Image: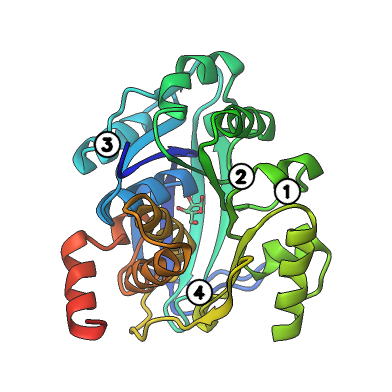
Amino acid sequence: MGKGVTVFGSFVTDLMARSNTLPEPGETVMGNFFKISPGGKGSNQAIAAKRAGADVDIVTKVGRDQFQKLAFESFGNEGISTEFIFLDDDKSTGIALILVAEDTGQNIITVVPGASYNIKESDIEKAKEIILKNDYILLQLENNLDATMKVIELAHERSIKIVLNPAPVVPLPEELYKKIYVITPNESEAERLTGIKIKNEDDIKKACEVFHKKGLDNVIITLGEKGAYLSTPETKRWLEPIEVDVVDTTGAGDAFNGGFVAGLANGMSIIEACEYGMIVGGLSVTKMGTSISMPTMLEIQEYITSNVE
Ligand code: RIB
């Protein structure tokens, strides 16, 4: 099979505005940049993985509206097949309102998932061949949970390695954890899923232990500018972020996940893939935007040549 990854996830249209600082509730601030671009955690991760060297298949859903065109164009431009972009008759294409602060590069996001949250059993049936095609499948939580669970079930039955980025976090059924190969929450998602309030490094290790007790072998907690913590039966280790000038952190988690799974699909160990994901995630924050800021293979190789080898 080789380098293949199926991404089962969302496509949404990102409406992004940047201002010097983020507005407080009730406040209006003047912005200095606006862009409409392809987004959604599934789409961002698919594009990151493709640019980072994986053969990617995407299964997603959009509405019959003006925004669907962006999905077809964006995946088409990346060389990702658009065959399994389903069209919903009732819901519109999802959108995300993203505000980015120029002073810190931080963001706040509201997602209205629309068609992404209306994936039907019949869609999954039609996409079964693609869901079961590759060694790895990458999922997030921007689709309706029943569909996500169904896909996990199918992939697990075929021993496909499932990477779950539990974002945006929702409570998950306990039986799910045993089926996951790697879970990649950020700090707040790890807190919500484990019940451990993360205040220090010990708490991160405790949260990993809770995941392990639930039956999950491989846990990566991403920590933004503090890097990531990897906990597997073989290793427990901190991973440092790469040093870059931060412009916009939106989609950095998606870049990490895409890079990580591309690394796995290319035969890297979990540790190596995690380090590779850190590079992809780090490079993505040097540009504005989400999927449009995912580093190209050339940029990744240039970084590795100048900084790693
Ligand atoms: O992770 C960033 C993404 O979250 C954005 O592209 C936005 O669409 C939301 O889904």
Q: How many residues crowd mark 4 within 10 Å: few (<14), some (14–19), many (20+)? A: some
Which residue is disc 1 drawn over? 170
Residue 248 image offset from top left, x and y in percent: 40, 72
In the image, is 262 to the left or to the right of 306? right
Q: Marks 3 and 1: in contact by CB < 8 Å?
A: no
Residue extending farthest front: 234
Q: Is mark 1 within 8 Å of ligand 1?
A: no
- Where residue 295 sits, quadrant-wise, is bottom left
Task: Give the tally of numbered discs.
Answer: 4
Residue type indicated by callout 3: Ile
CB of mark 1 within 8 Å of CB of mark 2? yes
Q: Amino acid at mark 2?
A: Leu
- The mark nearer the N terminus, 2 or 4, is 4
**Alpha carbon distance from label 4 to label 1:** 22 Å
Q: Is residue 280 left or right of residue 103?
A: left
Point out which mark residue 141 bears: 2
Compared across the picture, whether 257 is left or right of 166 comes to left
Q: Position of residue 218 (x, y in %)?
A: 61, 60
Look at the numbered discs 4 and 1 and tell me whether their residues touch, using CB distance below 8 Å: no
Q: Secondary structure at mark 1?
A: loop
Q: Position of residue 254 (x, y in %)?
A: 45, 57
Label 1: how many residues lie within 10 Å, few (<14), some (14-19) or many (20+)? few
Nearer-N-terminus badge (4/1) = 4
Q: Provide the residue designation for mark 4.
A: 106
Under circle 2, the secondary element is loop
Q: Nearer the viewer, mark 4 or mark 3?
A: 3
